[in-house]
Image: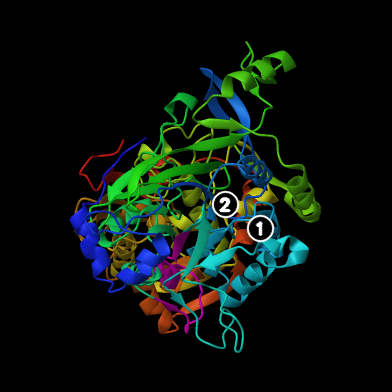
Amino acid sequence: MNTSHPLSSARRLAAWSALGAAALVLTACGGSDGDGAPSFKAIELNIAHINDHHSQLEPIAAQELTLDGVATQVELGGFARQTAVFKALANTPNLIKLHAGDAITGTQYYTFFKGKADAQMMNTICFDAMTLGNHEFDDGDATLKGFLDALADPALGGACKTTALASNVVAQAGTALAPANGTAYVKPYLIKKVDGVDVGIVGLSPSAKITNSSRPLATTQFLDETTAAQKSIDELKAKGIRHIVLLSHLGYDADKVIAPKLSDVDVIIGGDSHSLLGDFKSVGVATSSGAYPTVVQNKDGGTVCIGQAWEYAKAYGLMNVKFDDRGSVSQCGGTAKLVIGDNFKRKDSAGAWQTLADADRQALVNKLATSAQVRVTTPDATATQTLASYSGQVAAQRAITIGSTSDALCLVRMPGETTNRSTGVAGCETANTLARGSDAAQVVAEAFLAASKRADFALQNAGGVRIAVPAGPMSMNTAYTILPFTNVLVEMNLTGAQLVAALEDATANHLDNAQSNGSHPYAAGVRWDLDMSKAKGQRFTNVQVRNKTTGAWAPIDLAKTYVLVTNDFIAAGQDGYTTLGTVYKTGAYVNTYLLYTQSFVDYVKAKGTIARPAAADYSHQKVISKAGVALP
């Protein structure tokens, strides 16, 4: 996609004159044109980027795409394939390599190695910069420091010195990220020379989301995103730098909102929302959050190019941005592509998946060579060898089968969301459009309820459940990938009114407060009708509780005290669960010390085979979207 929306000469001149540094700018940039506005070398940037790989270092097997018009199983992603892609792009002129955050947490590679494996694999690409996502803070500043130390360790390939960026994160001196008499680990921006021209790269992290959803030190400050970003941009402008890239972990919608609030931003490379941008319908992926690149305007009326590259090392983006001799964006272009292997399977006449014969495989590879949606890639040998040094250590535990699923357990955060987080999992093609929402979160809540002897119902936030589960055998690895964090189960006494208030808190967190929809609630033993078009306090109706003994449903008694079991993260009020946090702070809870992942494992083992719950047992019964549409 190409576009042009040059900033007017008068507006540009006014903006630069306001700096009071015209002489510095003219010296740095080379001159001015006839109207007195500074002139610049016209340049072209190419930005290769990924985001939200979440310790997903191995490829994802048996993902179904439509290739050359035929349903085909492929191996999707894998970090060693990303390494091969970035190496293949090495000769691209004026290339910048960026990671938009949430590199860590999500698989046992993080559980066991706390970022070391991710750092060494990232160093096979050698990113110029990464921004800090909210999950970088999940285990606190000290664990983040360990990850950044590994990223800079020459023994782990860290000679490339990837710079960690976050203009709105300020660590207190003497703490892990700002050691006394040492260099601060996090920089507000990076200046990179490209084709003789300085380009500013400004990092931006989600302040409220980190504070509410992770575990940073209380002394680490998370500043307002717009104010901090503009401050860094202004500092770069004062140095004579006109070309500004914002490396953001705010999410796609938030990036579109912040761009018009900022002067002089040109490009936003984003993460957090796991957004797939571009048109992938021809390869069987119907869900896209928007165009790649998405084009909006900044506060000055200048063009801003926005890009994001999905999740879990499945895709990469290559943004092409052309600047004119006024330093303004004249064109946005580029594409995002899925990264796939060349071992293809298709169904035979009996409906069984069979590997393509070599001649057919090669013919398909040749056809896909010009695809705008996929890139067939052989994993990089060095990166594969690096990963092998870690994978052997987790293989034994991961291989243990704990049970099976008779149905695919689809992953959804908010019912009706545009992103299908279960793409490629058979049986989940329309999961995001259905009122019931997340099968996976529902089953997790049922497991928590089974683990508690006292609880009347269980509650789980959508974002804490990380993957969809295909039908078939379930391994220990699957369990630890579904629930990768280190939470324990907590029992709390709540009135019916407090439970309803907690549900309202959770949805208001994303519907009203522009926070992550990972706060969206799922429950076992309690169900409701939800109208997201209503105001807070009016969204949840017909709330009912299931009797643990008889299984009968009855309206919730707002005055009665019930026992809730949930993870300690939202029990403490994180992710917007304010009402729970208020109760938690009084000490009115019991820590069961049951590890939440192990509780899920025990549930699967006890059941043997997991099916989707009965329709009547889903927490979401009737749902109306924010736009007022009743979901099926």
Residue shown at 53% from the left, 87% from the top: 173
Picture quadrant of residue 571? bottom left
Q: Residues within 10 Å of mark 1 (few under 14, many from 20)?
A: many
Task: Tell me the tag on residue 53.
Answer: 2
**Left or right position of 261 against 393:** left
**Left or right position of 584 against 595:** left
x, y percent for residue 71: 55, 21
x, y percent for residue 100: 50, 56
Q: Is residue 574 above or below residue 176?
A: above
Residue interval drawn in magenta: 198-222
Marks 2/1 in contact by CB < 8 Å: the verdict is yes
The residue that disc 1 covers is: 118
- The amino acid on which the numbered mark 1 sits, given as a three-letter code, is Asp
Evaluate whether residue 577 shows in this view. no
Residue 148 belongs to magenta span: no
**Left or right position of 574 against 480:** left
Evaluate whether residue 351 shows in this view. yes
Picture quadrant of residue 503? bottom left
x, y percent for residue 514: 31, 60
